[in-house]
Image: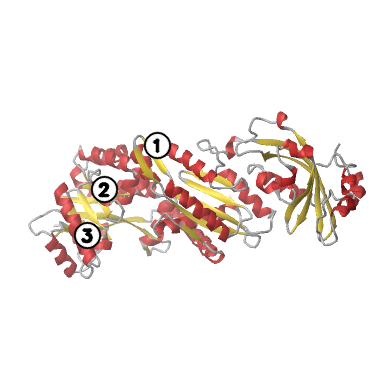
């Protein structure tokens, strides 16, 4: 028997008997208030919920309704069991529906109530909202079990991550957008963004099957650390998000500490290898004062996670409301740079510069030049690379930039082949995004053949971080070029935590020592020792060394004493336009 509008007066009398004027709930079993007798007149009522301080407290649930979800009625009284047991995939839709029904005071909706971690029951809920006064507002509902009429899981495939069975990014965005549109609890929530440290190394070293299995196990680990009311999603790759509803930042910190402890105890075993996994986590508060759309929330949370990685990884970083505005402002600036970069490509405002790399041993005649990309703004002024390159990398424009550099460099080398020395070579930087492209080798080889450039005239620089993250592709690419006579350099060496361990797996010809160890080498004994150690290892492995940030003659002289092979920096030569090369460098 459904709840009809004709029941209104009788329901008002019932609800008045169950609560005092101050909103306190009476015991409906107490004979003094005759509530039990009144309830017997309404067999269609499955539950009665009191909305108090923007939360729903169950003050009555029938035995039939409790049996539908396999629960004890006594444990449900006084609790907001919808928050804990409403299926996370249905919550946004239900909140949206109820918010639309508030004005009419009457509605119906289907949703799932979770009975266990993996099982749920489909409920058809027909409800009426009754407000007695400003302190007493009720939801009176009638349940029907409609599981037999629903599909097995009732979940649309475009909201589910097929690998882990969790929500995907679309599913999480749906949750966040609905909270921003209708803050059901009018309290603080917490959004957490999780990134697995060194996942790419595991994926590239042990293969994608190992990476996929790791993600499945991490999904289970995270689920076991959360309550049923929390919403967990795998956004993409090794990035997960958790929405902790009605959870302050302080309490979120406690939950995330528990997750970090679970990570520290977790060992991933794969084909005889026992691997330690850690995570970097960013957290932001969400409340009814600062609700935004899902994209903004995830942007800020992701930036908090990135800050955690930059501060050493395996840590939790919280972004405050004040910091949030800074992050969004930075995001806006980055997006403006993306537009400017694409426009610069269309208007042909990119240029190549070069910087000399000279031998520190007078007996060697070998000389190199590193090719550098530069951009001019709309007025023709040179834009510092630190302004646009971060946006290039962050918004996946690196491959486009790399291909432009390679094509432009090869065209220039072909055009000026008559004045270039045979024993000089030109270095081209490759990003991690390019290394991840399996077609990179074919593209580069075609450029050599199309422009008829000697392989010995070009070498490719890859940073230590990008090489390790794309280890298999990097090794294959370098080996392919080695067979044809081209060389490779490992840039920013020493910046990683496992530099020496991975060096033996990378068949590079040159090691460019990270400038962080060079610029203070005269004052810092630790930096000096690090440079000497890199030099010793390089000799043992048959590789030559290049020092960056050689800013003056004193540093240059110290590097010569150590035995470093080449130097690069403002003390040797500043970057100059390729258009000046014929005047400045030609014999």
Residue at image location 41% in from the left, 47% down from the top: 277
Q: Nearer the viewer, residue 436 or 332?
A: 436
- For marks 3 and 1 on the same chain, the one whose residue lies earlier in the sequence: 1
Residue sitting at the far left = 363
Instruction: State which quarter of the image contains the N terminus.
Output: top right
> Which of the 4 quarters of the picture holds residue 73?
top right
Q: CA distance from mark 3 to mark 1?
A: 34 Å
* Residue with the mark numbered 1: 210
Q: Nearer the viewer, residue 586 or 176?
A: 176
Q: Residues within 10 Å of mark 1 (few under 14, many from 20)?
A: some
In this view, 485 is above or below 137 = above
Left or right for 148, reference 576 = right
In what element is the residue under mark 2? helix
Residue at image location 48% in from the left, 54% down from the top: 281
| Residue 585 in view, yes or no | no
| Residue 33 in view, yes or no | yes
Residue 12: give x, y in percent of width and height: 89, 51
């Amino acid at each position: 028997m459904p709840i009809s509008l004709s029941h209104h007066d009788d329901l008002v009398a019932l609800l008045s008997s169950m609560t005092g004027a101050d909103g306190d709930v009476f015991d409906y079993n107490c004979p003094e208030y005759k509530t039990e007798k009144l309830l017997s007149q309404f067999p269609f009522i499955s539950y009665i919920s009191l909305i108090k301080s923007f939360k729903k407290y169950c003050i009555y649930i029938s035995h039939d309704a409790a049996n539908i979800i396999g629960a004890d009625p006594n444990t449900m009284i006084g609790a907001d069991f919808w928050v804990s047991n409403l299926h996370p995939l249905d919550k946004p839709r239900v909140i949206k529906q109820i918010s639309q029904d508030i004005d009419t005071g009457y509605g119906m909706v289907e949703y799932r109530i979770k009975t266990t971690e993996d099982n749920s029951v489909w409920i058809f809920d027909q409800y009426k909202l009754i407000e007695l006064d400003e302190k007493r507002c009720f939801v009176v509902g009638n349940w029907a079990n409609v599981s037999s009429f629903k599909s097995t899981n009732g979940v649309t495939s475009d909201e589910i991550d097929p690998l882990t069975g969790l929500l995907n990014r679309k599913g999480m965005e749906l949750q966040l957008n609905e909270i921003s549109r209708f803050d059901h609890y009018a309290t603080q929530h917490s959004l957490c963004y999780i990134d697995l440290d060194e996942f790419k190394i595991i994926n590239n070293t042990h293969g994608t099957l190992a990476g996929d299995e790791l993600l499945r196990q991490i999904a289970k680990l995270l689920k076991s650390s959360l309550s049923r009311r929390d919403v967990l999603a795998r956004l993409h790759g090794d990035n997960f998000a958790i929405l902790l509803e009605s959870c302050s930042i302080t309490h979120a910190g406690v939950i995330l500490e528990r997750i970090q402890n679970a990570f520290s105890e977790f060992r991933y075993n794969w084909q005889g290898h026992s691997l330690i996994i850690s995570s970097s986590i960013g957290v932001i508060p969400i409340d009814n004062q600062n609700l935004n759309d899902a994209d903004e929330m995830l942007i800020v949370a992701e930036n908090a996670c990135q800050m955690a990685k930059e501060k050493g990884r395996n840590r939790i970083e919280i972004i405050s409301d004040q910091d949030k505005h800074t992050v969004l402002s930075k995001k806006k600036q980055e997006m403006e740079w993306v537009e400017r970069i694409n426009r610069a490509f269309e208007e042909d405002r990119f240029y190549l510069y070069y910087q000399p790399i000279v031998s520190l041993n007078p007996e060697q005649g070998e000389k190199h030049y590193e090719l550098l990309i530069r951009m001019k703004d709309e007025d023709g002024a040179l834009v510092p690379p630190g302004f646009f390159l971060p946006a290039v990398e962050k918004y996946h424009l690196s491959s486009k930039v790399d291909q432009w550099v390679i094509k432009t460099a090869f065209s220039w080398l072909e055009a000026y082949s008559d004045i270039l020395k045979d024993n000089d070579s030109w270095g081209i930087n490759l990003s991690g995004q390019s290394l991840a492209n399996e077609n990179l080798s074919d593209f580069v080889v075609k450029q050599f053949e199309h422009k008829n450039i000697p392989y010995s005239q070009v070498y490719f620089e890859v940073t230590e971080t990008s090489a390790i993250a794309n280890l298999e592709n990097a090794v294959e690419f370098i080996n392919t070029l080695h067979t044809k006579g081209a060389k490779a350099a490992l840039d920013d060496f020493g910046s990683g935590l496992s530099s020496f361990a991975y060096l033996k797996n990378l068949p590079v010809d040159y090691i460019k020592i990270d400038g962080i160890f060079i610029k203070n080498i005269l004052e810092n004994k630790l930096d000096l020792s690090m440079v000497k150690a890199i030099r010793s290892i390089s000799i043992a492995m048959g590789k030559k060394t290049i020092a960056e940030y050689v800013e003056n003659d004193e540093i240059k002289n110290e590097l010569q004493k150590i035995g470093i092979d080449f130097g690069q920096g403002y003390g040797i030569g500043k970057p100059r336009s390729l258009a000046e090369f014929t005047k400045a460098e030609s014999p």
